[in-house]
Image (cartoon, coloured by chain):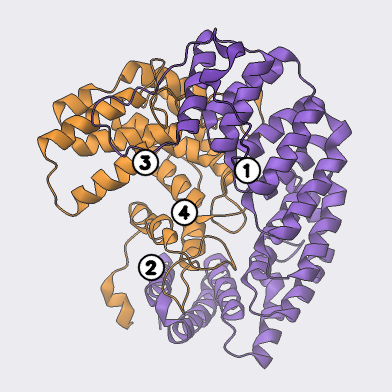
Chain colours: A orange, B purple
Amino acid sequence: RPWLCYWELHSLNLLGQELDAKLQHDAVQFLSRCQHPTGGFGGGPGQIPHLASTYAAVCALITVGTDAALASINREAMHAFLLRMKVPAESDAVLGGGFRMHATGEVDIRGTFTALAVAEMLGIKTDDVVADVAPFLERCQTYEGGVGGEPGTEAHGGYTFCGMATHILLNQKSKLDVRKLLRWAVLRQGAAEGGFNGRTNKLVDGCYSFWQGGVFPLISMVLPPLEVASLRA
Amino acid sequence: MVTGDDSWVPYCDRAEWSDVVPIPQDDGEDPLVPIDYSSRFEDVMNYFRGICKREECSARALDITKEVISLNGASCSAWFYRWKCLQELDSDLLDELDYIDTMGKTYPKNYQLWWHRRLVVEKIGKIVAERELQCTADALEVDTKNYHIWSYRQWLVRAFQLWEADLAFVHKLLVDDVFNNSAWNQRYFVLTRGGQHAANLTSVLCSELQYVSDMIRIAPLNEAAWSYARALPSGEDSTTLEQLVPLATAILESQPTNLQAIMTLTDAATEMSRAADTSKHDTHTAKALELLHRLVKLDPMRERYWAWQVQELTKARPFVK
């Protein structure tokens, strides 16, 4: 449900619609009930906290943007939650440095992105949050140039967005090969359809207009821009 | 996956559950995105929350997690609590594996289920490894690119060192569908021992170059094969791209507009341009530029990317025409 709140509130925001006071109030009230006393937000009231619903809830509350919305987030507990989700580097050669999505849950680059994005938005991106994140990200980049969910798994649009965004959130302090990522991303666009596919030799899908399309503004923050004059060279 | 079973009794009517205080969901007034829950869903969840509040890890607690999962397969709260109960009860994990295996056929794309499977199998150990490998092979027959299943298979291979079996499996899949990028990715995974040992791939470089070249000849526009080829390590006295020049050139003879081949030659020329001393630099740069302009014509959708490559190439070292 926090995802639904985020998609709808953020979409209204993108469309330039103001949120009336009651909607703002109801959003804060409801999302507060999704917040777990030990930190983070679950998918609904009474659920365990999960990094995806946490990301969505924080984005939704920031979109609402009122003092009440921002104040409703328990930043201290959130910081503790993020650190609990971290996999200690020394405990696992493959997944060390990654984040679990929830207690005893799966580890993949979504956890890394959602954790760092939340940390950034809430001003709690401390050294212990970012420790060992870069090597995990680097291990997730595949021979194709895109990023997989875990070290070894296939380059995939959703995970690549997470990976590139993580690199930016690390202030580019990772050895992610952005040129190689760019090449892979550019080849994901289908000449017949115009949209993007998520993986090599798979079908174009609208969702990748976001995951793949959205990676280019991030790449532009890193690589030199195209100077228009060159097109005519 | 609710069974249409008229004998189902709500928890609130079960005498043996009367000691558990049901906890209604605290949605508050005017909640956003309210869900129109069935009364069965509400009843089950009220008692699940009640059990969690008591921190009870009994057989009935384990049972109710199964019920929650049947109503909402993605309930991470239920999967979390189920794993907790299994550990505290020291349950028969082989039974649990049978349950997951059955559920996996209904929910093949469920993150929680496939991770739970790892936790269970890790605890059981090597004794079920081969069987699990076969289960993933069967599941991949239904959906040859299911990301969860490939991830799980990679974990199995790593955890139980099943590298050799996987190579044979990958080859079979490529024979069935040479375009399957998940299979090519798995091949790379196996040969580099999960990215840990590139040296292992170096030792089979010659045969791999032959293997992928044969596959490219079968389907010359197959991006998956070309990507794999580019990922092979350098040879003793030539880079990877240099090694691919003869193949790309040969392909272009019969297919002059093959984009993959042209891209390969372009990248090879660019690489040589960067590495070359001044006397050879201009030749390679000219070649790369000619190929990039060909790409702009043949692949106009990516015009801006090819133009950017031109820009990067010419500013790296000034090119005197």
Q: Secondary structure at mark 1?
A: loop
Residue B305 in the image: x percent, y percent? 41, 71
| Disc sitting over residue B190 in the figure | none
Determine whether label 1 and label 4 are within 8 Å by CB.
no
The N terminus of chain A lies in quadrant: top left
| Disc sitting over residue A178 in the figure | 4
- State which chain disc 4 sits on: A
| Disc sitting over residue B315 in the figure | 2
Which-is-in-front pick, marks 1 and 4? 1
Q: Nearer the viewer, residue B87 or B40?
A: B40
Task: Residue under label 1, please give it.
Answer: A151
Which-is-in-front pick, marks 2 and 3? 3
Query: Which amino acid type is marked by label 3?
Result: Trp
Query: Which amino acid type is marked by label 1?
Result: Pro
**C-alpha span from label 2 to label 3:** 45 Å
Q: Is B245 rendered above or below residue B32? A: below
Task: Residue under label 3, please give it.
Answer: A3
Residue B249 in the image: x percent, y percent? 67, 84
**C-alpha span from label 4 to label 2:** 18 Å
Residue drawn at x 30%, y 19% as measured from the top left? A74
Query: Which amino acid type is marked by label 2?
Result: Lys
**C-alpha span from label 3 to label 4:** 29 Å
Q: Secondary structure at mark 4?
A: helix
- State which chain disc 1 sits on: A
- State which chain disc 3 sits on: A
Does residue A141 appear in this view?
A: yes
- In which quarter of the view is residue A193 placed? bottom left
- In which quarter of the view is residue B223 placed? bottom right
Q: Secondary structure at mark 2?
A: helix
**C-alpha span from label 1 to label 2:** 35 Å
